[in-house]
Amino acid sequence: MEEIGAAQVRETKDITETDDIVLDVDIVEAGYEAGDPRIFDISFQVRRGQLLGLIGPNGAGKSTTIKTLLGLLKHAKSKVEIGGANKSYAYVPEQPVFYEDLTLWEHLDLAAAAYGLEYGQFQETAERLLKQFGMEPVRNDLPAGFSKGMKQKMMLMLGFLVQPDIYIVDEPFIGLDPRATKDFLRLLEAERVRGAGVLMSTHVLDTAEKICDDFVLISGGKIAATGTLEDIRAQAGLPEASLFDCFDELA
Ligand SMILES: Nc1ncnc2c1ncn2[C@@H]1O[C@H](COP(=O)(O)OP(=O)(O)OP(=O)(O)O)[C@@H](O)[C@H]1O
């Protein structure tokens, strides 16, 4: 058990190599101040190759759930098992985080060094990602001068570079143009085929409906519905309905 702050009880334990589960989350409660929890009883798992959509209205508790499973909140009672055989994960935040003085290429290089990637493999993967995201022309530029979508692409590239067991992606679609969205989804699909799991928080429900295997719908800090689109439709009492209509009914 790992104690981080008086009110936090966050356990991490190993997932065995034979296990298909790459993320196992069991949150009793979590919040930003002692005695003021914002999310309650949130439990779910992500398996290899699975894309789980974390959806819910503004303020429902999606980001709080993600911060809790990353171990970033002081006031949390939770048990989280993260990563498969390699114990590796990539977190792609909604708000880009970068170093003012490092170029795009230097960011990639730094991430590769931090994760201990072999240099030849790093170069090959980084070159491929620069091409795939159309970012070759700005490889030696500082990200402070990038557009919102370009910063978002940099964050996605840093995640893909690492090829982790699980991707935790917070709202990837806002800011990406249609071409970049397509490139991102193609890369994500390839990673799922490789065996990576994905937890993705998003408001873009028409895309989520097409790409996610399963959903966790959070409302008012609690789980309002879980399962496949069919399960969600049954829970909403709306057979044939879109994810958007089910969301409206359940949230
Ligand atoms: N840094 C913070 N300090 C205090 N309270 C916060 C903080 N961030 C979020 N909250 C509160 O926690 C609750 C859940 O917010 P959270 O950010 O998890 O929602 P969300 O589902 O991610 O919403 P959105 O879709 O708008 O991003 C809300 O009541 C919000 O006011």
Image (tube, rainbow, N blue to C red):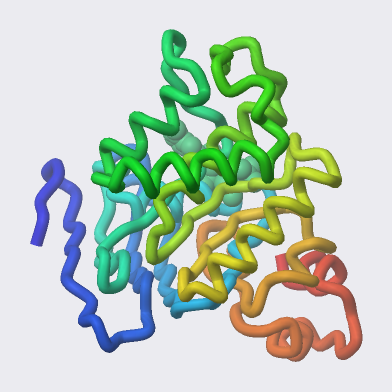
Q: Quadrant of residue 156?
A: top right
Instruction: Look at 65% across and 79% down and name the residue there.
Output: 213
Decide if residue 116 is on the left or right side of residue 184: left
Instruction: Look at 20% across and 58% down and name the residue there.
Output: 10
**Viewer-side residue, 119 vs 242:** 119
Q: Is residue 93 visible?
A: no
Q: Quadrant of residue 200?
A: bottom right
Image spot of residue 114 (x, y percent): 26, 38
Q: Is residue 239 visible?
A: yes
Q: Quadrant of residue 148?
A: top right
Decide if residue 99 is on the left or right side of residue 216: left
**Viewer-side residue, 38 vs 182:** 182
Instruction: Look at 27% across and 88% down and name the residue there.
Output: 18
Quarter holding the C terminus is bottom right
Image spot of residue 40 (x, y percent): 42, 63
Quarter holding the N terminus is bottom left
